[in-house]
């Protein structure tokens, strides 16, 4: 078979079949290209590619009328001439880190000694130098001088390229608006990190549920599977935000029918603000009692009078489902009204104002 490719030439092709030890590549010819399956098999023996997938490979040689390709050169393929070709064509090579030396590491590429600087070993998850010694890693030749006597390698360049390829693939697979399923990797006070195909996305605590979540440990545990919606993706900074809240029903749907104007309901104080009280009426639905409707003076510090969890009977004054706002008024019992009326009657001719009665104030506001 006549050589259609130059040694070291890179091509992009599809995988047409995978057997026990070989990956067959579509070359648009009568026969397929051949790639050693071991090159794309992880330490657990799992093949990292599938039939139909597109990959980039380098032409290695025509052996017995078979076109052989590689994703990297192994030790047996690394003679001087091949290494120089790998340098010129950017073909990755496999090397064994034998020892730490001044400025970096000694690496054996086949029977050839090469050097990898500290700065070119590892990428994001950098290890202690001693941890690299003894490892079998993939490198790209950065320098090839003095007829192969001075060879400088980079493991970092390989890892960067792999990370970029993975990111490009994920960018196509994970898009804003789609629903995904992943596992909780870690839990922080501000959110949970979810692993999606090796990429970690953040599920902020504010996006967990319409109902307020105080502690994520009450909702999730590490290793738990979770389904969420992708609401934001910043691939330039490798960040993604998820939401499980987006998959819940809107708690405000039908709320106007559930709480029509005039409805009297007993709720609990969910939050005390300077301008009034937020009263929880239903899960994730709060209404506001403005300070002007409360039996206190306008400049009163409400946090000294009320606290979260206090029970208050209120009446619905208005409902705006579009803006998600409900206006409420406190309900004063008949007994309280009678007491306030009696108080007002006794104080009618008095201006000293030494005694403050909140229910009397509320009654004044209602007259």
Image (cartoon, rainbow, N blue to C red):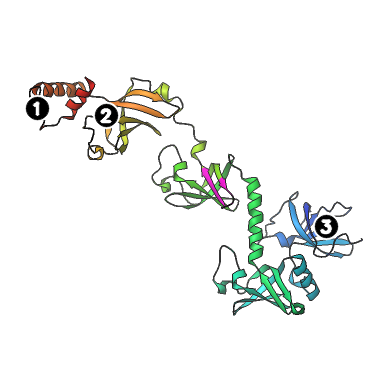
Residue under pointer 2: 292
Residue denoted by label 3: 33
Q: Is residue 240 magenta?
A: yes
As for residue 347 lying within the magenta part, the answer is no
Q: Is residue 334 left or right of residue 194?
A: left
Q: Earlier in the sequence, mark 1 or mark 2?
A: 2
Q: What is the C-alpha distance between the residues marked 2 and 3? A: 81 Å
Q: Quadrant of the C terminus?
A: top left
Give the crowd class for mark 1: few <14, some 14-19, many >=20 residues within 10 Å: few
Q: Which quadrant of the figure has residue 297? A: top left
Relative to 150, say whether 33 is above or below.
above
Gap in angstroms between the C-alphas marked 1 and 3: 102 Å
Residue, disc 1: 351
Estimate the x, y position of residue 164 in percent, counting from the top left.
64, 56
At a point 59% along the width and 72% down the height, the residue shown is: 118
Span shown in magenta? 233-242
Residue at the (82%, 52%) spot, across then down: 26
Is label 2 or label 3 in front? 2
Element type at marker 2? helix
SS of the residue under disc 1: loop
């Amino acid at each position: 078979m006549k050589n259609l490719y130059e040694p070291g030439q890179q091509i992009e092709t599809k995988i047409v079949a995978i057997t026990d030890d070989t990956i067959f590549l579509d070359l648009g010819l009568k026969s397929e290209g051949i790639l050693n399956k071991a090159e794309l098999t992880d330490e657990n023996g799992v093949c990292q590619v599938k039939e139909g997938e597109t990959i980039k490979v380098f032409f290695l040689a025509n052996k017995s009328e078979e076109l052989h390709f590689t994703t990297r050169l192994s030790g047996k393929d690394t003679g001087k001439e091949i290494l120089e070709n790998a340098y010129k064509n950017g073909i990755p090579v496999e090397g064994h880190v034998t020892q730490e030396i001044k400025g970096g590491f000694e690496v054996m590429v086949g029977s050839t000694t090469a050097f990898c600087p500290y700065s070119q070993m590892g990428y994001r998850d950098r290890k202690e130098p001693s941890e690299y010694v003894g490892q079998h890693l993939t490198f790209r030749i950065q320098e090839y001088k003095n007829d192969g006597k001075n060879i400088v390698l980079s493991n970092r360049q390989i890892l960067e390229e792999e990370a970029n390829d993975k990111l490009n693939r994920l960018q196509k697979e994970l898009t804003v608006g789609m629903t995904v399923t992943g596992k909780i990797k870690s839990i922080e006070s501000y959110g949970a990190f979810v692993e999606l195909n090796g990429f970690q996305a953040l599920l902020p605590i504010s996006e967990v549920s319409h109902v307020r979540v105080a502690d994520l440990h009450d909702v999730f545990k590490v290793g738990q599977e979770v389904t969420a919606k992708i609401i934001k993706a910043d691939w330039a900074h490798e960040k993604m935000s998820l939401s499980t809240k987006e998959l819940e029903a809107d708690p405000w749907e039908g709320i106007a029918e559930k709480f029509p104007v005039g409805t009297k309901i007993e709720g609990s104080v969910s939050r005390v603000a300077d301008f009034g009280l937020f009263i929880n009426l239903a899960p994730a639905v709060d209404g506001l009692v403005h300070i002007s409707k409360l039996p206190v003076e306008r400049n009163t510090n409400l946090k000294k009078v009320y606290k979260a969890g206090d029970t208050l009977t209120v009446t619905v004054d208005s409902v705006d489902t579009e803006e998600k706002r409900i206006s409420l008024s406190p309900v004063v019992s008949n007994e309280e009204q009678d007491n306030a009326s009696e108080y007002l009657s006794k104080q009618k001719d008095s201006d000293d104002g030494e005694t403050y009665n909140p229910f009397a104030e509320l009654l004044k506001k209602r007259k």
